[in-house]
Image (tube, rainbow, N blue to C red):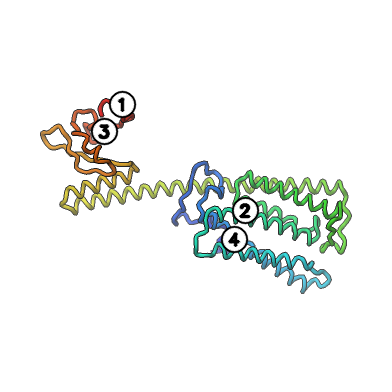
Amino acid sequence: MSIFSVLGKYFLPEELHIDTSSVVVPYSLDNGKYYVPGKQHAEEVSVIARWLVRLRWFAVCGFLVMALCFSIFFHDVLLPQPLYGLCFVIFLYNAGFFFLFTNKTIVSYQTSLSAVRLQVLLDWLALLMFIHFTGGIFSPLVFFVILHVIINAMIFPPYQCYIYAAVSLMGLGALVLLEDVFRYFPVSNLWFGKMPPALDPVSLLISFFLFSLVLFCATFLATSFMARLRERENDVRLLTRKLQKALTRMETLYEATKAMVSSYDLTAVLDRIVQDSVRMTGAQGAVLHLLREGEIELTPAAACGLSEAFLKKGPVKRDDGLTPKNPEDVIIVDDVEHDSRL
């Protein structure tokens, strides 16, 4: 197994590397072209929440490694103290989500979905704070906004991803206004010295426009890729359900055949055939009639899921139009209440 396979297995949610030979979680295929948490079962939403927790542990460890490297190799450049407090806050709320979803008790669907949305909101706020304390608009962490949008594309439907991208741009715009235009929260810059470079309005607008273009292009590419991936995943799930139904039918036929050759009780064999037929076809009930030689009336021999009143409604005759003439014939009654044959 390559190192990329190992990283993908750990840092991607289970749905993106699921083995098609494993048991597939039941899934609603109604308009299921895109992966929408609102249409998933609680177990799948919990998988996404646990995946976000795993990524956040990686981010916290990455910050600590970066702080250690700064202390060793860059003695003149010190990370702002609020960053350590912010990292501790991320550690605390991530620990809360970790204990929530590692608990043996099943988390409800609504709780799981709310936790996913809350995690995305908290991470977005934490990212803005990190950008502010590492140089504002000049911080290299600004590009992590693109990564945040790509992660959202793995979780939410496309229209919500575009909303998140627009909100992220508005957040960056508000950060520029508060830091550099109105100077409510002035920042020092770690990468260019104590004071950030002077902002030229025209250059700033061009940079903001280009960054917005890149962000929406990344959103489009990520959502398009995930849409195709989820569509194929739905095809695999649908095919798996069909195979499971076919396997159930084969098992039912096998059990019925085994019962017929191993039992001398005709009544038990016929009851088993009727019950298995109802289960295979998904019908509400069924009745099996036998035709004795030389008679025109069919005698009910086995029934399943039908009322006593229906079974005692009277004899069924061979020439009433409801009895197949050949074993291959299928008779369908469209209107039970008004059909003259009933």
According to the image, label 2 marks what residue? 117
Secondary structure at badge 3 equals: loop
Residue farthest to the bottom, as pictured = 72
Name the kind of residue labelled 3 in the image: Asp
Q: Earlier in the sequence, mark 1 or mark 4?
A: 4
C-alpha separation, residue under disc 1 versus residue under disc 2: 54 Å
Instruction: Indicate the secondary structure of the residue bearing disc 2.
Output: helix
10 Å crowding of disc 1: few (<14), some (14-19), many (20+): few
SS for callout 4: helix
Place residue 197 in its image quadrant: bottom right
**What type is the residue that disc 4 sits on?**
Phe
Coordinates of residue 174 in the picture (x, y in percent): 79, 50
Q: CA distance from mark 3 to mark 2?
A: 56 Å
Camera-near label (2 vs 4) is 2
Q: Identify the mark nearer the N-term, 3 or 4.
A: 4
Q: Is residue 194 left or right of residue 54?
A: right
Q: Residue at x 60, y 49 (%)?
A: 156
Q: On the image, which quarter does residue 213 sit in?
A: top right
**First in sequence: mark 3 vs mark 2:** 2
Q: Secondary structure at mark 1?
A: loop
Q: Which mark is residue 338?
A: 1
Q: Earlier in the sequence, mark 2 or mark 4?
A: 4
The mark lying in front, picked from 3 and 2, is 2
Q: Amino acid at mark 2?
A: Arg
Would you say the residues marked 1 and 2 are in contact, meaning their CB atoms lie under 8 Å apart? Answer: no
Give percent across and percent down for residue 100: 56, 63
Q: Is residue 261 above or below residue 64?
A: above
Q: Which mark is residue 329?
A: 3
- The dot on residue 11 is 4
Rendering quarter of residue 187: bottom right
x 63%, y 49%: residue: 222
